[in-house]
Image: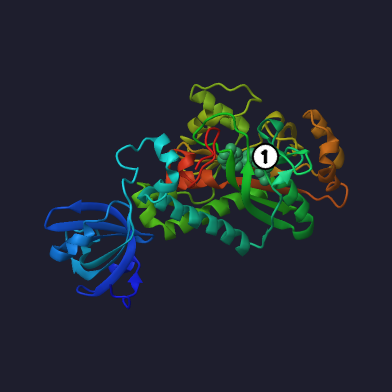
């Protein structure tokens, strides 16, 4: 083999002049032996290209199988029939890592593809999703850093529930005590605004979700922000700016991936702020016009959210949920104490909630009475209560489910398709 010929990314080969001698390395995506000719479709992280071996050269090429890794040398040739209009006329091939009976063939049932996820991540679909996911994470960091937020980190081991005890994951700690995996970094972010004022974090959160749905993981990526002095209106503004920033970045950087996933770009292009804002009461009215009656005070589930978002062509905030459906830390609306200064952001096209947030209780006595009202013990929240004893300020924040956001932006059917190695009720492998 010609050691001096440096291998190039497959995407670069399409830019090369016809007749250029090139080398690539990658994996065999498809393989076809027509006797006198052997066709290999080779893929790398940047794309796929067809390589055709004839005569002598075909002997070595015949040894490969799907997903073998190869080093190929050949000349660039234009061919209208080849995907991308160019192919490589193969001259030499080195088999680097053989592959036999790659298990993903015809059986592509959901469960099977989850069992072999460590191999399915090589697929075009997963590669496109992961490239979009990469852009989403980068854009989240980009937005916050451009807008004066400090990135902070909170612990994963915690001692008291943020989002209710039902979904807490107990862990036996080194000293024999029981601690829990965090459901949200919110309380730590609240502590940090007294130092840095505007903070954010992107970290895993854990919930022992007992039900199997299209949108629940037991371990998900949570992007949370907290802002000193901010009101509910201020924080909704931040959320819509952030979402639009992320959507624009994906539209700029991932056209090919969106198209390969069959995503309709115009549905994303129209997600320009301002987003719609409706109150919980208005949401109930809308639902009742659609023939669904929800008792005032009950939460909106996935089905109700799906019905609601049918009415909107871009994301919609539902604000001022009743006190009892939102966690204890939500501040009551002074004009209507039975509702909270909370808002969920629902994504269009049936996706539903991707963000939950709002204004926090900042008064000590009010917080203690809310904790008790929810059947919790103030002593479990001692340090959190301290934040209301020393220079308390009004503040608001939110948590965005990154996997759900990727699911919506990429137009996926199931949250487990929005990350490479999902964790759900029944799955912790591979
Ligand atoms: O429960 S949340 O609605 N809110 C909180 O955890 C707040 N403590 C966040 C904050 O204000 N700092 O969760 C926020 C988002 C929610 O809208 C979903 O998009 C996502 O987190 N989320 C999930 N994604 C995937 N799987 C599960 N189980 C899940 N639970 C919440």
The relative height of residue 129 versus residue 308 in the rendered view (above or below) is below
Q: Residue at x 20, y 52 (%)?
A: 32
Q: How crowded is mark 1: few (under 14 residues within 10 Å), some or many (20 or more)?
A: many
Report which residue position mark 1 lands on: 342
User: What is the residue that sits farthest to the bottom in this orientation?
Assistant: 4
The residue tagged with tag 1: helix, strand or loop? strand
Locate residue 429, reporting x and y percent: 51, 40
The relative height of residue 70 versus residue 247 in the rendered view (above or below) is below
Could you tell whether 197 is left or right of 388 in the image? left
Locate residue 334, reporting x and y percent: 77, 37
Q: Nearer the viewer, residue 340 or 370?
A: 370
Locate residue 280, reporting x and y percent: 62, 32
Could you tell whether 55 is left or right of 190 in the image? left
Quadrant location of the N terminus in the rendered image? bottom left
Locate residue 3, reporting x and y percent: 32, 75
Could you tell whether 236 is left or right of 113 in the image? right
The relative height of residue 172 versus residue 304 in the rendered view (above or below) is below
Whether residue 345 is visible = no
């Amino acid at each position: 083999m010609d050691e001096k010929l440096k291998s190039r990314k497959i995407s670069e080969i399409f830019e090369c002049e016809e007749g250029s001698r090139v080398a690539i390395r990658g994996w065999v995506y498809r393989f076809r032996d027509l006797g006198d000719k052997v066709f290999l479709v080779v893929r790398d992280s940047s794309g796929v290209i067809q390589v055709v071996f004839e005569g002598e050269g075909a002997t070595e090429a015949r040894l490969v199988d799907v997903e073998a890794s190869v080093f190929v040398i050949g000349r660039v040739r234009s061919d209208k029939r080849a995907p991308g209009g160019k192919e490589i006329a193969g001259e030499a091939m080195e088999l680097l890592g053989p592959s036999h009976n790659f298990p993903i063939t015809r059986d592509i049932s959901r469960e099977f593809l989850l069992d072999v996820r460590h191999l399915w991540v090589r697929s075009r679909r997963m590669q496109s999703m992961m490239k979009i996911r990469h852009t989403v994470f980068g854009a989240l960091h980009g937005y916050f850093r451009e807008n004066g937020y400090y990135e902070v980190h909170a612990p994963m081991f915690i001692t008291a529930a943020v989002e209710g005890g039902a979904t807490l994951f107990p862990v036996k700690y080194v000293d024999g005590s029981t601690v829990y995996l965090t459901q949200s970094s919110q309380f730590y972010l609240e502590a940090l605004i007294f130092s840095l004022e505007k903070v954010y974090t992107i970290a895993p959160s854990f919930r022992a979700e007992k039900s199997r749905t299209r949108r629940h993981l037991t371990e998900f990526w949570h992007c949370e922000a907290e802002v000193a002095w901010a009101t509910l209106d201020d924080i909704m503004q931040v959320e819509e700016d952030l979402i639009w920033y992320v959507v624009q970045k994906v539209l700029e950087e991932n056209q090919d991936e969106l198209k390969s996933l069959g995503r309709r770009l115009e549905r994303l292009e129209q997600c320009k702020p301002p987003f719609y804002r409706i109150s919980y009461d208005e949401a109930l009215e809308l639902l009742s016009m659609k023939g669904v009656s929800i008792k005032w005070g009950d939460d909106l589930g996935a089905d109700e959210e799906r019905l609601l978002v049918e009415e909107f062509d871009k994301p919609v905030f539902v604000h001022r949920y009743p006190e009892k459906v939102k966690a204890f830390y939500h501040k009551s609306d002074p004009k209507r104490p039975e509702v909270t200064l909370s808002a969920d952001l629902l994504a269009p096209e049936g996706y539903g909630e991707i963000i939950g947030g709002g204004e926090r209780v900042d008064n000590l006595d009010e917080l203690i009475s809310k904790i008790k009202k929810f059947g919790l013990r103030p002593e479990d929240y001692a340090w959190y209560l301290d934040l209301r004893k020393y220079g308390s300020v009004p503040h608001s924040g939110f948590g965005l489910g990154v996997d759900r956001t990727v699911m919506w932006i990429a137009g996926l059917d199931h949250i487990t398709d929005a990350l490479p190695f999902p964790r759900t009720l029944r799955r912790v492998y591979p």
